[in-house]
Amino acid sequence: MSEQNGLDQHGLVVEGLRVDAIEAHVDIVSEVSFSVPRGAALGIVGESGSGKTTVAMALLGFARAGTEIVSGEVQVGRHDVLGLENAPLRDVRGRLISYVPQNPSRALSPAMRIGAQLTEMLNAHRPDHTEHHELLRRAWADAQLEDDRELMRRYPHQLSGGQQQRVAIAMALVCEPLVVVMDEPTTGLDVLTQQRLLKVISGLRERRRTSIVYVSHDLGVVRNLVDHVAVMYAGRIVEHAPTDALFQDPQHPYTRRLLEAIPRVRRRTGRLRGIDGHAVEPWNRPGGCPFAPRCDYRVERCDVDMPPITSATGMRSARCWRLRELRAVEPATPTGRRRAGSAGAPLLSVRGLVAGYAVGGARFRGRRATKIAVDGISFDLAQGSCLAVVGESGSGKTTLARCLAGLHEPTGGEINFAGARLERAARHREAAVRRRIQIVFQDPDGSLNPSMTVGEIVSRPLDQFFPGAKADQRRRVGELLERVRLSPSIASRMPRDLSGGEKQRVAIARAIAPQPDLLICDEVTSALDVAVQASILELLDDLRLSAGMSLVFVTHDLAVVRTIADSVLVMSGGRLCEFRESEALFTNPSDDYTRQLLNAAPDLNDGDYPGWAAAGSHELEGTLA
């Protein structure tokens, strides 16, 4: 620690970073510069494909297949990461700068115990074994993992998602680096687990003076965690500002549109406003400003010349031809309201639903032991209405959704759909009923056939339920892709060529292709950036209004719930804690567990919620060139 404490106050300095696609001969990321002092945190935000993860990986000298880092400097302490090769670079990774991935289950070795994986990191970077015990203890404590030898002996698959993520954080901390890069570390986690992890991150800044680069599409988390924010679009930083200044007075048109797309937990918003058009791909960028085709303030010059870097008041800057004019223009406020579901007989009626899983190998009187995941749940859902199902990981939300879809057979209770009793297994349901009930899963990697093109995936339900001319199907596929804010040109691409957010939108397009009456959505927005999320919520709202489609929306994002849901079902340990109209639940929750969930939810307001104090105020330097 003594060597690192004596280093320059800047934990990280980035100058002129550029990453190119080798075959296409175009830049994916360009002109990226910023610095992060010791103990400070910088948030990097933007849509999928904006270059956030490319920047995050480049900070450690990594480049994805087919790309290369062609210029720039990344200074960590006294080392230029991009100037190092082979052994010196491997030594810096983990010792001076480390990385926390979005999906720890894929980053942790499934064949090694947790303790062995942390020890392997220490053996690589800290040869003095006398320090290992103390370093392990500190990393374990800072990641708020239980002081339990048994936990160290577990394999990754034996841990919950929150535990896996904290293990990934412990692994990133164990060598006590100056800088930790975190790439969407809380995506997919429920609000209580997320709150615990973000307390861990805030604590790092106080106890270790660790510099943090936090990549995320969750602007509510960013608002409450970091000191400065860099907004990226088409591989460039288009605005850089102190956090409070950016959220209270956004300067760039793109930043404004991102903020307009964010739902709120603590006040009801109107209809969210997505961003028209598609995020631009590196090889299809227009001349001039890349955001111009989607910009509300576009002028002729925007189509011709790239706007210069313009410094605003304080430690902020932005890239826009009309920046001075726009400072006097108030950002738009979302307008419009949702329509509640229709009265009359419910489309879906659930009574006393019970479902469980066999656990272990032991048997009692010839039967395997069963863990109850859904315990006596009852509710009604009206035609054209949206029911949100919320709760912690393990509360039974997904099991309930799978029972409704016929993918998990309940052991008790009944489900009625459109006035008729629903068969428990989808394979026993008539084709007309299967068409009317569709589901979108949280992980599109597990639901999209990797050997089929996007067009084939989306057209498959059309083949099954609406057989017809192939030309009509191709047109319909293009329309469906447009509805989920994807270019029809991706119909010929394979799932492996898409980002996580793009795959999820393909899964949604496939689910709405057969024009269902009931759409079950299991965490479908957790991997989407706020602009795409707003567009998807807008699409689902339109389907409710125009086609009377009903939604069962499983999610941990309470801001999304307040935006889209007519009623909310809160689950804990498989049981129903609270089932109420949405606004009544948010304004006056009756259950202590519901209040706990609401208090843990990040929001864009003042950032003064329990557990959400930042570790201090720091001045960050940032430019766009």
Image (tube, rainbow, N blue to C red):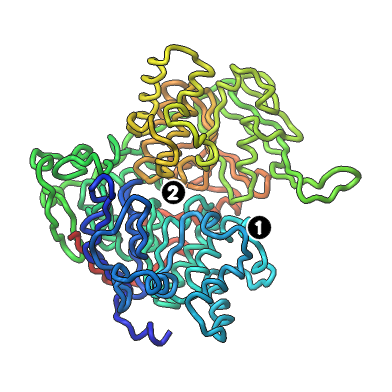
State the mark number for residue 158. 1
The quadrant the C terminus occupies is: bottom left
For the residue pair 264 and 207, the one nearer the viewer reads as 207
- Give coordinates of residue 414: x percent, y percent: 71, 29
User: In the rendered picture of this protein, how many numbered marks are placed on residues?
Assistant: 2
Q: Amino acid at mark 1?
A: Gln
Instruction: Name the residue furthest left.
Output: 301
Q: Amino acid at mark 2?
A: Val
For the residue pair 310 and 348, the one nearer the viewer reads as 310
- Give the class, few, some or many, for how many residues have Cα within 10 Å of label 2's Cα (few <14, many ≥20): many
Marks 1/2 in contact by CB < 8 Å: the verdict is no
Label 1 SS: helix
- Give coordinates of residue 268: x percent, y percent: 40, 43
- Give coordinates of residue 313: x percent, y percent: 16, 62
In this figure, which residue is indicated by the disc labeled 2?
A: 265
The quadrant the N terminus occupies is: bottom left
Label 2 SS: loop
